Image (cartoon, grey):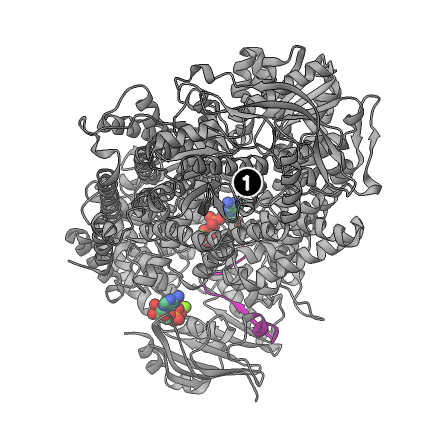
Amino acid sequence: MLAIEHLYKSFGALQVSKDISLSVATGQCHAVIGPNGAGKTTLIHQISGVLRQDSGRVLLGGQDVSHLSVWERVQAGLGRTFQITSVLPSFSVLENVATAVQAKTGSSLKFFARAADEAALNEKAQATLSRVGLGDRIDRPAADLSHGELRLLEIAIALAGSPKFLLLDEPMAGLGKTESAALIDLLNDLRSDFPMLLVEHDMDAVFQLADEVSVLVEGEIVARGTPSEVRENPQARAAYLGDGA
Amino acid sequence: MMDRGALIGGVIFALLLAMPVLLPIVGAEYLTGLLIKAMLLAIAAISLDLIIGHGGMVSLGHAAFIGVGAYATAIGLESGIEEILVLLAITLAVTGGLALVTGTLALRTSGVYFLMITLAFGQMIYFTLTSLAAYGGDDGLTLWSLATFFGSDIVQEGEGLYFFVFAALFLTWLGVWRISQSRFGRVLRAARDNPQRAEVMGYPIARYQLIAYVIAACIAGVSGLLLVQYAEFVSPSIAAWQRSGDLIVAVVLGGLGSRNGAILGAFFIVIMEEFLSSIFHEWRLIYGPLLVVLVLYAKGGLNDLLHPKSREAS
Amino acid sequence: MSLTLFLILCLNGLQYGLLLFLIAAGLTLVFGVMGFINLAHGVQYMVGAYLIFAFTGLTGSFWLALVLSLITALLIGLLLEYVVFRHLYSRSHLDQVLATFGIIIFLNELAKVLFGPATLSIDTPELLSGSIQLTEQLRYPVYRLVTIGVGLVVAVGLFLTISYTRTGMLIRAGSTTPEMVSALGVNVKQLFQIVFGVGAMLAGFAGVIAAPIFAIEPGMGDNILIIAFVVIIIGGVGSIGGAFVAAILVGLIDTLGRSLVTEALGLVFNASMANQIGPALASMLIYILMAAILVFRPKGLLPAKGAT
Amino acid sequence: ENLKIGMVVTLSGPPAALGQQIVDGFQLALDEKGGMLGGQAVDLIVEDDELKPDVALLKATSLIEREEVDFVVGTVFSNMLQAIFKPIVESETFLISPNAGPSTFAGNNCNPYFFVTSYQNNQNAEVSGMVANEEGFENVFVMAPNYQAGRDNVEGFNKTFEGTVTDEVFTPLGHQDFSAELARMSTSGADAVFTFMPGGMGVRLVGQFDGAGLKDSMKFMSVFTTDETTLPGQKDAAVGFLAAGNWAPDMDNEANNAFVSAFEEKYGYIPGGYAMQAYDTANLIDSAVAATGGSLEDKDAVRAALKAADFTSVRGDFSFNNNHYPVQDFHALTVVKRDDGKFHTSFVRTVVEDYADSFASECGM
Amino acid sequence: MSHIARIENLHAGYGRAEVLFGIDMQVRQGAVTTLMGRNGMGKSTTIRCLMGLLTPREGSIHISGKDMTGAPPFKVAQAGLGLVPEGRQVFPSLSVVENLRATARPRADGWTEERIFEAFPRLAERKGHYGFQLSGGEQQMLAIGRALMTNPDLLVLDEATEGLAPLIREEIWSMLDRLKQTGLSILLVDKNLDELARISDQYYVIEKGKIVWSGDAAAFGAERTKVEQYLHL
Ligand SMILES: Nc1ncnc2c1ncn2[C@@H]1O[C@H](COP(=O)(O)OP(=O)(O)OP(=O)(O)O)[C@@H](O)[C@H]1O
Ligand SMILES: Nc1ncnc2c1ncn2[C@@H]1O[C@H](COP(=O)(O)OP(=O)(O)OP(=O)(O)O)[C@@H](O)[C@H]1O
Ligand SMILES: [Mg+2]
Ligand SMILES: [Mg+2]
């Protein structure tokens, strides 16, 4: 479904992606783990088009999307969340999600009819919000949400865009135990609908969700395998997991 | 469905509609000119609010489009075109085309950089107008013939012109409000709030912003056309950056992105200037501090004074 | 065009650029670094010019008047901050625009009421009047040379302060995350007040310097404000170094452009045509420059890193 | 029923000084006549056009529609006149300009309801050309701001000047720093400079001209640059500079001496041409209203009475041409410092008598 | 043992929304105090009030025995509180070194740049980077370092381990352990019960703006299931 081939990226002298290749098949959840500053977010930025790679290719469903702009990739089916929450602060929670739904349903070059009255958009948004557990917050301005609530909204926005492939950048961060557990269940359900690439420091989540794990250190993939293989991998342990996991 | 905003809007328009009847009764027909001037300012202010209030694109070159519209009309008139609908088509084509070009370039930037690049384009237009020696240069041009409506001179003076401008204001008000609430308007507001997020939702935001920019410019152009009908005169000074500043003041004072704010702001400015300057020659000593006080104490603009705590658009 | 003339133009451009820098520096500090749009900055320049006029009249000494003017400009800046600006830090840029616009209207009118509408002037201080021989053919007024020197000193001082001192760091940090600066133990309000005062003083100082060369009149700050904005935009908002480079650039291009554009057009068109469009084009030049720079570098030449 | 006179002048921004002179000059004449013109008590309504065409228009329409004035007196600037011209003359109200005299309304578009008591804009420059000839200047550096009036003045000068124009320089309006132009001047080899730099631009130019030490090497000749509105700012720097105009405060005739001393006493400053023209305007209206016996309904009669210009102008001979622009004498002037330390322009000699503008022949009236 | 911070009957909210309804909390000198609760229950709001970032509507806040209710944040910070805020909030336009220096309040044998870089070698490698160029985790380390550089008496950490790799997270916990040994008081908002259980002396559980459970380490050990119930649905 998603394939990355020989991706390189540097910021000045700092190389953050060194020959990264990986692929994710339909129905799969592929986790990328690695120390802070290893280049995980940068990788997601490159896949989603927020940053341009220096060289290499990104393929979505066999199509080369490397030179498409961000919105074109989204229209082609990529969805993503941001590690540092990014929502529409002056919109209500519902309208945040409805706006994401709107992008994928019909033209937005409509100038006269009230968008807020479109039942189809609102229903889908409402359903998505209920799924992530924000069902009782829909009328709040997004700016008024607590940190954890914002993290959930971030996920709802990504899901509402009906992606074919989902990039998740630390979705569990900021969530409480309960909320994390619920989100793990939700993502588990969704996995059959669309494959995903998960970046996460919460190892419980990674080991519960991932079919395959890549360990990224200093911009390079140093180990790859099933969760249990990676857990035993000495390189991964030394660089990242420590002895706790 | 009659919400508060529609109610206030309805009252404003009902009052404006009744003015030609009311003013003669109280012997104040001379106010018609003032009202036309205020309505013209309001049209331009509403169009500016589309891009500032809803689109987050603060333009300091908006008056240039009024100037371009006015000059397109004036030059049309000078070369013998008198039908207002033809002049309208010319005005829309010229302002729209110009906005398409300058907007494409300007939208590479955002925030205060956008403000300044629009200022730059506005100034270029302004200086170009001042060098049109054939059309009066800096001094401007008195128009000895005006536009007609299907050959009739009904849109030239007095009530005919008043209602024509009124209709334009109403359509602008309604149109911009509907746009702001439409799917298009929602994308525009999303791009204002968080451009990166809107892009990652799948919207080519620059395209939406450009469309809004062109729409706003076209409306401003129309107000320029009407200004020619009213003033029977054009001069480059209508395109000066200070005029764009006045428009921003009207929009902000009225209340950004609100349904009636731009109208309220425009009328406030015109009426206060008229009123204060008639009682006190150094009226600016009052007007300046008044603006400061309004900013400090009426946080959502004049609109919020009438309409507290329910910002509609956002 | 002779070489001498060209040199004079360059010196003039440099001098104009440094004057612009003095104004732009305060503006970019307050705007770029503190995130506050202060349109009243231009009117503070006017205040400086009127102050030196009033104080030279009162004291008879330029130098004493200079000191008094700077102090008064600072006090007026602090007063404005206390009465108006501090209530606007957390408000939107457009609210700031509107409120400071109100201040412009007020102060311009006040100047007119107090000093009359006519254009005023003061003499160059005795010590700095006259001109010196730079080359065989080139004489240049001492006062203008001193202006260049003073501008350079202020530029270097400001640059070092903002880039390398702790105060500079705090000012930069305060612009993006004032709450956090405060929560880490720094009195941000006071800091902002000081920056404002210094900004006002710089603008006032520019007004003082300009007064003997240009003339003093109500509204004299309005156009220079716009040019100062052009400067900080070209330089990149919030960047003192950028403002410096841009100020010199704008000063030179504007000065050279005004003299050379018509002449250059004269090579292509006939004289009357060149005279028709030349001056309009010369007036547009800095705007064309700004637009071109922004099209290719949407954040200016040397944007401050990480500022929004 | 009082006589209603509306006045539209610029009273905002730096040019407010000019508008103020007009108000003061007019008011002085009014006061001297006990608040009456032509035997009728006068309501004078003064409006500020703020130098914005749309404001001027609004003020003008309110004068004719709301106040229903009998005369409108205005404006200072030509572009303001353009803005208010059509609605006023179309309402058949008399419009008398105490200063602006654009060519636009002097030729084809001359109008029966429009009178000018100052001059046609090009005239002063044309006379400057003659002055330059008389002074024997062979090479003159010409400079003006780049707008209509600037270009008109340059054109006017070139029309009569017989020597060589070494450079023709147009600066932007509101120009601040003239040092580049001054540098060009100093290397141009010209004997004199002719310029039109009204208001603050003139103050700056004169100061910088003096500062650059050019005073010794070339003559300075100008119109609307060193006048009673700018001299308080220019002071000694302008002394000895040449000018051309239709009047100077020290022109020696009885009416003028009375006017100038009364004006100074009342307002504390030396009147300039603006005040003088406004003073004459008031006297013109006075004569016309008196001649019609106070009945202003008969517009033709009023027009004829105005046209007759049956009043004593402080500048001496004064009459109207067929286009309602003045025919008058023009003089060479120079800037002097009075014993009390004040500065003014001073009469040198008359250059041309009964000088009419060159557009009148195109006027069909 | 004395209280370094005491919160009594704290009511607070945003605009018309009430969020806190009478919070009572004590932070003891030299101890580690924990505030727990599900998302959106009012933890950060409590911290904001304590720091003076939000003015309480009712109730009082004492720091080291002094009434600091409604005091501006910089006064609170100068009274000895060092905040690691939710969402990091590093200074984006300052380099790593400048971030540490700008608000530092040096103290004899207190924290220095060298010690911070020793604790977070990663930051040393990114010394010259601007705040906005750092990865999420690097920003988190920087926020902690920045607070330590003010050499506080009470370190306040709002979800300070969010987004940190497991190794670093462990490192932070052991650092907190060491800090506690040196007598520093610590107020924690976190969700890692296991780690908290190891280090904390006093616990508060907040639900819908009220403290619904509090107790010391012993009580926490004994009633852990009850606490977990509060934290779960
Ligand atoms: N714009 C930039 N300029 C320079 N360096 C950058 C920039 N953005 C990121 N970096 C550096 O690149 C490296 C990788 O950053 P990235 O955000 O991808 O890390 P990450 O793996 O997501 O880390 P974390 O787990 O902490 O979120 C970091 O060391 C960061 O400092
Ligand atoms: N700025 C704000 N304006 C209005 N309401 C707010 C604001 N910030 C937070 N809230 C509301 O206050 C409540 C408590 O928020 P708070 O941030 O204190 O929660 P929290 O316990 O820290 O949650 P989290 O674990 O998600 O960070 C939430 O319901 C939130 O929606
Ligand atoms: Mg990351
Ligand atoms: Mg929180």
Q: Which residue is mark 1?
A: D22
Q: D324 or C241, which is in the foreground?
A: D324
D75 relative position to D355: left or right: left
Disc 1 CB within 8 Å of nearest ligand 2 atom: no
Disc 1 chain ID: D
Q: Quadrant of the C terminus of chain D?
A: top left
Seen at 64% across and 64% down, the residue is E104
Q: Is residue E19 visible?
A: yes
Residue D195 within the magenta-colored segment of the rendering: no
Q: Is residue A244 above or below residue C119?
A: below
Q: Position of residue B10 (x, y in %)?
A: 21, 54
Say left or right for E85 vs C20: left
The question of residue E79 being in magenta is answered with: yes
Residue B169: x percent and y percent?
26, 43
Q: In the image, residue D250 lies at what x, y percent?
A: 69, 34
Which residue is at 45% across, 14% downward?
D361
* Image: magenta residue range: E74-94
Percent position (x, y) of residue A215? 43, 50
